[in-house]
Image (spheres, rainbow, N blue to C red):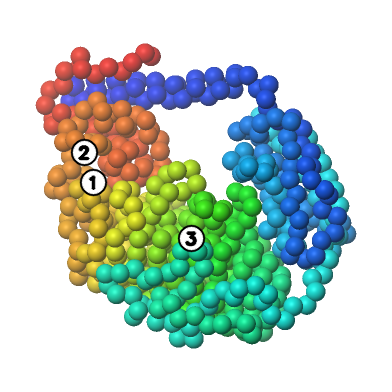
Amino acid sequence: MKQAHILLFCAINLVLATVAGRVSAADRLSQANDSDRAGQVTFDSEPLGGFVQGHAPSQRLSLDGQLWFDQHLRVLVWEQSRPKATVAFMQNIAAKARSTGGYVLPRARLNSLAPGNYRLEVQLRQASFAGYKVISQIEQSFTVETAPPTATEPDAPAPVPASEPQILESATDSQEPTLPANNVAATADQTLQSTSTKQVVWNLTPKANTTYSNLILRGGVTAIWRTVDNVTFIDCDFRDAAVLLTVQARDDGSDACHNWQFIRCTFVGATRSDWGHSHGAFVQGADNFTFTNCVFSYNGWLGEQRFNQNHNIYLLDVGDVTFTNCVFHRGAAQGIKGLGYQRLEVVGCVFSGNLIDIGSDDRSASNALIVRNSRFYNVGGYDSIGSMLGWSLALEHYNNNLNSVLIQNCKWFGPAVTSNTWAVKLAGSGVQSATIADCDLTGWHINTAIWPKIVNYIGSRLTITNTVGITDSQILGGVLNSTVLADEQGLLPGDANYDGTVNLADLQILADNWSNQDATWLMGECSGDGRVNLEDLQILADHWNGGAPMDLSTLVIGQP
């Protein structure tokens, strides 16, 4: 016990030294020569003037220096007849959004504007102790003109699902459903319909108690801060916008939409010209939304790059949402992102090529997640900052509850990456109950000696029944208690680098990740709560060198 106390004292010093090193590095950065810091922003192209709706010209910006890490450009657009506070859109442009043409205004957002007279303002802002201060500002006025009516789609038609797509039946258990690689989605059996007879509609604002069918909806479909109930879309293609569908209630839940149906619709290629939010669909505060035989594909990308904040569909504080026989293909980050829902049900769906297929976390409380009869293929890839991700179901609720999870009769197949990939991750005290039943993980090809198939940080609240293709050693944390079962799995508590010994290397890993709130075993988190803290440090001390007496001369803490 005395040896363990000494180790704890030394380890805490190491953690403090590591944190101090981070602070000193930040201090050195702030003291660096900032002579090349941007101080002025100007327009680098002709004024917008007037343009036809959906056909905004490119508008470039110039700076007299570099945009530093504590600076950004803020773009504000509002109708001249309305107060500035009621902005049509606001977008921040950070340093990483720079391209070979410099900084460019968000053209997709300009294209989504309804006809009218607008004011554009660009601010160069810099962080300060009191918030952000504006150090340079430019403005101009412009007009969006009404687009001429168009009867048919002028360019090559985009594919849509067949009237009865056989999504699961056409995908064999060993082969991923084949989807095109050119940012165009199709159903698994590749049966396409001609769109030559579809009418093109720009910037649709839906009306209550209305059915829209056989349309190409360009520029975004929006219902923001308006109660619009009982809307149906049948055989419609959502295209050409930063967010193809936006349904948004107020933050207090008022002006919400109810009872929307989407049948055989496609949501393809949502994108923008900068690193801003972009989704196939964004739904906030709505209730009773159903998607049947729909396809979501390649939404949220910036050219060939993923952005880990953009998704095929993003659900925020919603009621009941159901997906039946849908395809979620190559979302920039997640296939389905859920932040607060009453009941999210996914039945008979196919997921392919997303960084995370279904993600749920705890900005808001959620009640029930049900995933049945679905298939998961080739999850994973690299996000916009080069991190490798590949989590099929990532359910993490540390503060607000997710009351129940049911994953039933699902199958997983080989991930696209060979590390940092899990079929299911359950973490946080908020996950009250989870059941994995009648599932098959046989096809999940991964180096399970290093990466488990299931990560269980909720202990005995997880039940696994009648499921094949997985053993106890492939469940990180086991089904009862991660600290106890770690030895049964051949994993030594505190052995963060899997070398079979708890030593200084593991202590350094723990110190480097100290206070991390979303940690894994490889980051020193061995208690099962997802956090690197004193509990993990105590476990490491208890298992130091297998419990043998420790020679303190081998512990080099470094300079205080």
The residue shown at (58%, 70%) is: 286
Instruction: Inspect the image, locate mark 3, and give the three-letter code of the amino acid beneath it.
Output: Gly
Instruction: Inspect the image, locate mark 2, and give the three-letter code of the amino acid beneath it.
Output: Tyr
In the image, 255 versus 293, the foreground residue is: 293
In the image, 284 versus 273, the foreground residue is: 273
Can residue 366 be seen by looking at this rendering? no
Is residue 543 placed above or below 251 in the rendered structure?
above
Contact, mark 3 vs mark 2 (Cβ under 8 Å)? no
Instruction: Specify which label sits upstream in the sequence, 1 or 3.
Output: 3
Q: CA distance from mark 1 to mark 2?
A: 8 Å
| Side of 194 relative to 400 (left or right) | right
Give the image location of residue 200, x and y in percent. Answer: 69, 77
| Side of 300 relative to 198 (left or right) | left
Q: Quadrant of residue 201?
A: bottom right
Label ID, residue 32: none
Contact, mark 1 vs mark 2 (Cβ under 8 Å)? yes
Q: What quarter of the picture does the N terminus occupy?
A: top left
Instruction: Specify which label sits upstream in the sequence, 1 or 2.
Output: 1
Is residue 495 placed above or below 296 in the rendered structure?
above
- Secondary structure at numbered mark 1: loop
The residue shown at (17%, 58%) is: 471
Q: CA distance from mark 1 to mark 3?
A: 27 Å
Instruction: Inspect the image, locate mark 1, and give the three-letter code of the amino acid beneath it.
Output: Ile
Q: Badge 1 is on which residue? A: 450
Total numbered labels placed on residues in the image? 3
In the image, 298 versus 2, the foreground residue is: 298
Label ID, residue 498: 2
Q: Badge 3 is on which residue? A: 331
